[in-house]
Amino acid sequence: MTVSETAKVPTASASKYLQQLCKHWQHNLTVEFTADHGTVTFPKDARGADWPGDALVTFDASGEALDVRIDASVAEQLEGLKGAVARHLDRFAFREAPLAFDWQVA
């Protein structure tokens, strides 16, 4: 089972934030990214967790927004990652923070 949500986060610095997030997480997670697209895999056992499966966070940057999609194995994992993504993004976007996340079921 996969649960997914998406958010369009308004910002003119989407590509910059996508790259900062991916570079930050590539130190201990599987990350692939370009200037306008990135994926981060959060293992099911990350930080001592025991989720049924891995989660995937996908970022797509445009000139006016950063699109975020989270595909998780269960709702609790999804909720935790929504918080982690928002906290990290707000940290990099401190001049604009808090950014608006309008999460929608995918």
Image (cartoon, grey):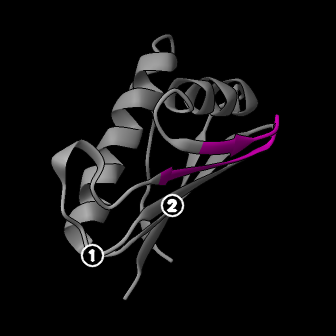
Q: Quadrant of residue 21?
A: top right
Coordinates of residue 57 in the picture (x, y in percent): 52, 55
Disc 2 + disc 1, Cβ < 8 Å: no
Numbered badge on residue 56 = 2
Decide which of 16, 30 is in the foreground and name it.
30
Q: CA distance from mark 2 to mark 1?
A: 13 Å
Coordinates of residue 76 in the picture (x, y in percent): 19, 66
Question: In the image, is residue 85 above or below residue 67?
Answer: above
- Residue underneath mark 1: 52
Which residue type carries mark 1? Answer: Pro
Question: In the image, is residue 25 above or below residue 51?
Answer: above
- Magenta extent: 31-41
In the displayed structure image, the side of residue 52 where residue 22 appears, left or right: right
Residue at the image position 82 percent from the left and 34 percent from the top: 35
Dominant SS of magenta comes to strand
Residue at the image position 17 percent from the left and 48 percent from the top: 48
